[in-house]
Amino acid sequence: MDTLSYKTKSAKPAEVVAKWFVVDAQGQTVGRLCSRIAHILRGKHKTSYTPHVDCGDHVIVLNAEKVRFTGRKMQKKQYVTHSHYPGGQRLRSPQEVLQSPHPEYIIETAVKGMLPKTILAGDMYRKLHVYVGNKHPHQAQLPEVLEPSKF
């Protein structure tokens, strides 16, 4: 038997071709949506997935302000930030974040927390583009639409 047939081929950074996908977040649950987005950003949906190479695709998320939470998370969950000054801790509920000028913060923080804590995470996170509303400036990249049932 030829032992070369058992070798696993690793993707090289120069060989990776990143595609563009569009996801509509309207009415979707935050956790399920963000875990699928993180899966695509890492490149785990590809057969050529290699853990030490950024082989993920770009993801454009539209209607970030129309996501939903299950249960009582809309009132009970807390987003914590701190200014690094005494008494600088700020707590906000998802309801307050969705009504703020930057509701895309919910999806961005959820996806960032699901990415690996390595140097590659920054490269993967830069491929995430979250927008309020259903318009985006990436039409030239010819993104494919991802239906909720497909990913």
Image (tube, grey):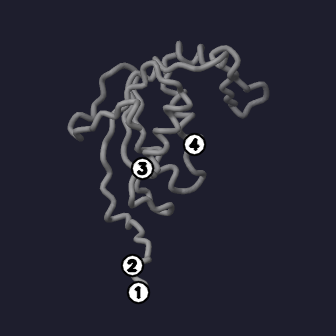
Q: Is residue 10 above or below residue 33?
A: below
Q: Mark 4 points at which residue?
A: 114
Q: Residue at x 53, y 19 (%)?
A: 68
Where disc 2 sits, the SS reads: helix
Which mark lies nearer to you, 3 or 1?
Answer: 1
Query: Residue 141: horizontal and vertical position, in percent?
Result: 24, 41
Q: Which mark is residue 1?
A: 1
Q: Which residue lies furthest to the right in this view?
A: 86
Report the front residue among 129 and 26.
26
Report the front residue among 113 and 39.
39
Query: Residue 56: horizontal and vertical position, in percent?
Result: 41, 51
Query: In the rendered view of the protein, which quadrant contains the N terminus?
Result: bottom left
* Comes first in the chain, label 4 or label 2: 2
Is the Cβ of the residue at disc 4 closer than 8 Å to that at disc 1? no
Q: Name the residue under label 3.
A: 45
Q: How far apart are marks 2 and 1 (CA)?
A: 9 Å
Query: In the rendered view of the protein, which quadrant contains the C terminus?
Result: top left
Query: Residue 3: horizontal and vertical position, in percent?
Result: 43, 84
What is the crowding at mark 1: few (fewer than 14 residues within 10 Å), some, or many (at least 20)?
few
Q: In this view, does 109 lie above or below 11?
A: above
* Comes first in the chain, label 3 or label 1: 1
* Comes first in the chain, label 4 or label 1: 1
The residue type indicated by label 2 comes to: Ser
The residue type indicated by label 1 comes to: Met
